Image (tube, grey):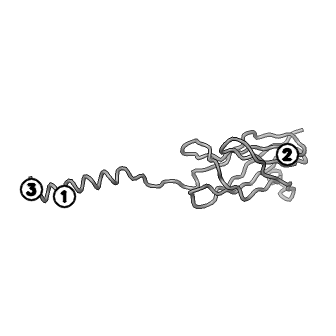
Amino acid sequence: MNTAFSRALRAALVGVAVLGFATPSLADIKDYEFRLAEPTVSVGRDKLVTVQLVNKVTGKPVPDAVIFAMRLDMAPDGMAEMATKIVREPGGEPGSYRFKAAFGMEGRWLLSLGAKVQGETGTVEGKLVITANK
């Protein structure tokens, strides 16, 4: 075998091997979603709501996201102006985020969230419906 051809073949094989081990970043902000741990809550003050942030591709929870937008209102029942205070609570399992809110009346409440995931560009947005019952 010709030495120049042999060197070229080896260089090509090394290149293929190196590229074969490189994993391209295929992450997309759309690969993440918020999920309610429990879709119902009792009417009243200081009710806890737990939400998980999940990578839909792997099915794994996403810890350490920065939740920067939170709103809770009755938009699903046509009363978007009926908003209530919502506060992030510490604790919970990795990938779970807890919030405390007052559910002043029965009905469907819309929890709107915005979060940044470490290492990702863009914002994860979620709109989850919680039903408040007596």
User: For residue 79, what is the image quadrant?
Assistant: bottom right
Kind of residue at disc 3: Asn
| Mark 1 or mark 2, earlier in chain | 1
Disc 2 vs disc 3: which is toward the camera? 3
**Residue sitting at 78 percent across and 51 percent down?**
88
Label 1 to label 3: alpha-carbon separation: 10 Å
| Mark 2 or mark 3, earlier in chain | 3
User: Going by the image, does 92 lie left or right of 86?
Assistant: left
Kind of residue at disc 1: Ala
Label 2 to label 3: alpha-carbon separation: 80 Å
Kind of residue at disc 2: Gly
**Residue sitting at 57 percent across and 57 percent down?**
120
Residue at far left of view: 1
The tally of labels here is: 3
Coordinates of residue 65 in the picture (x, y in percent): 65, 53
User: For residue 134, what is the image quadrant?
Assistant: top right
> Label 3, on which residue?
2
Looking at the rendered structure, the secondary structure element under dot 1 is helix
Coordinates of residue 72 in the picture (x, y in percent): 80, 53
Q: Label 2: few (<14), some or many (≥20) within 10 Å?
A: some
Q: Label 1: few (<14), some or many (≥20) within 10 Å?
A: few
> Label 1, on which residue?
8
| Mark 1 or mark 3, earlier in chain | 3
> Label 2, on which residue?
107
Disc number at residue 63? none
